[in-house]
Image: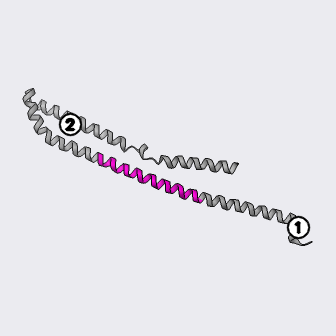
Amino acid sequence: MVQGSDPRQAGPSAGASSIQSLIGDALRETNELARKEIALFRAEMAGNIRQLIVGLACMVGSAVFAVVALLVLIGALVKWLATVVGSEWLSALIVGGVLLVVAVGMALWARSVLSLSTLAPKRTTRQVRQDAQALSERVSG
């Protein structure tokens, strides 16, 4: 009997070839999936960096506004309020307090924009979880 014509010898090598093909396909798909996930991560982080820059610009703007407001309005408002309340130090305290409230409000708003939870790559994380679940279902199924 010829060695190549024995059906028992052809079966295992064909099965091994099929398993190698499946493993190769799985590795290629995993590599492609990883590349797509990295591309999604980069795109999402670019958007988050833009948001960070806007938040930082707002923070700088609030600081500039606070300084300019203090310099310009203190002179004018303190003098005007001093004529109303009869005391220059009390009028300076009132004007300074109002401007401080405005500056703190802007800084708190900017801090909420700059929080780490808003910068996290949420879509990428969700997509990786979905892909992992799909892969585990595919492997087990």
Q: Is residue 73 above or below residue 84?
A: below
Q: CA distance from mark 2 to mark 1?
A: 94 Å
- The location of residue 120, given as percent across then percent down, is 45, 47
Predominant SS of the magenta segment: helix
- Residue indicated by mark 1: 6
Secondary structure of residue under mark 1: loop
Secondary structure of residue under mark 2: helix
Front residue of 116 and 33: 33
| Quadrant hosting residue 113 | top left
**Residue for point 90% across, 72% down:** 2
- The location of residue 8, given as percent across then percent down, is 87, 63
Q: Is residue 45 above or below residue 118?
A: below
Q: Is residue 86 above or below residue 21?
A: above
- The location of residue 15, given as percent across then percent down, is 78, 61
- The location of residue 34, given as percent across then percent down, is 56, 57
Q: Amino acid at mark 2?
A: Leu
| Magenta highlight on residue 50 | yes
Single out the residue that lies furthest toward the top: 85
Crowdedness near tag 1: few (<14), some (14–19) or many (≥20) residues, C-alpha within 10 Å: few
**Residue for point 27% across, 47% down:** 60
Marks 2 and 1 in Cβ contact (< 8 Å): no
Is residue 102 left or right of 83 when viewed as pictured?
right
Q: Is residue 22 above or below residue 95?
A: below
Query: Which is more foreground, mark 2 or mark 1?
Result: 1
Q: The magenta stretch spans which residues?
A: 31-58
| Magenta highlight on residue 47 | yes
Is residue 117 left or right of 4 when viewed as pictured?
left
Q: Amino acid at mark 1?
A: Asp
**Residue for point 39% across, 43% down:** 115
